[in-house]
Amino acid sequence: MSDETSESGAPIYRYKPREEGWVPPNMEDSNIEEIDRHIEKHIGKISMVFHEVISDLVHIDIHQIPPSDDRPYWTLVTSGMSDLPMTTPEGREEFGRAELMLCLPKDWKMEQSDWKDEAHYWPIRWLKICARFPHEYKTWLGWGHTLPNGDPPEVYATNTSFCTMMIGTPRTVSSEFWTLPIRTDKTIRFFGLYPLYRGEVDLKLRKGAEHLEELFDKNKITEIVHLDRVDLSKKPWWRIL
């Protein structure tokens, strides 16, 4: 539990690096094949899966779906985050399994050689960071949670002013994709990652995640990472809605 809250009343948690060293992942409860089928049923054909060479706690893969006529952008979806249950609050156990997704413009540099440049790699890096985070710090991530790049948050790379990731509703997919029932005690929930500007982080702290999601809806903002998208904390955008 946290004694620190934002102006909106939401709790603020601060974490310290864990003391134990590298822990090999336990993949006995992995559902990569079910996730593969779920992605191809609701999004499209997977062209590539980026496998981790060395994994700590959980083995995070990223499934790549290339641009198409229906979805003219890259789609990236994790698997492995749900191999272990997150440490959810009492009564929230049903939300203990999750995976994450985001989308990139079709002209984004997607060759692994390009990813040596952080300007091209930071969305992929943060998919992996967010997917491992709840297991590394024995916590959980769910709708409306934000994970900043430091305290205070710093920009991800030289090509962007984004500095924080928010867990939100995936808007580029149908609601049928949002959940994947595995068995009676395991349902995997899929969330979108939304990079935020510093002003939007402050807005979320003041008015809550619900307010920010309303602005996403009104401004047709999805989990597609557009480096030049409007900053919803700037005037006159949020005032004229």
Image: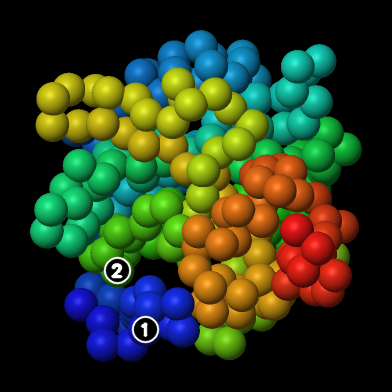
Query: Which residue is drawn at the image coordinates 20% and 77% (left, top)?
Result: 1
* Residue hosting label 2: 137
Judging from the image, what secondary structure is the residue with disc 1 in?
loop
Judging from the image, what secondary structure is the residue with disc 2 in?
loop
Label 1 Cα neighbours within 10 Å, binned few <14 / some 14-19 / many ≥20: few
Three-letter code, disc 1: Thr
Label 2 Cα neighbours within 10 Å, binned few <14 / some 14-19 / many ≥20: some
Image quarter in which the C terminus is found: bottom right
Q: Quadrant of residue 237?
A: bottom right
Where 70 sits versus 111, above or below? above
Three-letter code, disc 2: Tyr
Mark 2 and 1 residues: CB-CB less than 8 Å, in contact?
no
In the image, 115: left or right of 6? right
Q: Which of label 2 and label 1 is nearer to you?
A: 1
Query: Which residue is drawn at the image coordinates 65% and 25% (left, top)?
Result: 65
Pinpoint residue 164: horizontal percent, then vertical percent.
60, 68
Query: Which residue is drawn at the image coordinates 48% and 39% (left, top)?
Result: 78
Q: Nearer the viewer, residue 101 or 59?
A: 101
* Residue hosting label 1: 5
Pinpoint residue 105: horizontal percent, then vertical percent.
81, 39
In the image, 115: left or right of 55? right
Q: How far apart are labels 2 and 1 at the CA level?
A: 19 Å
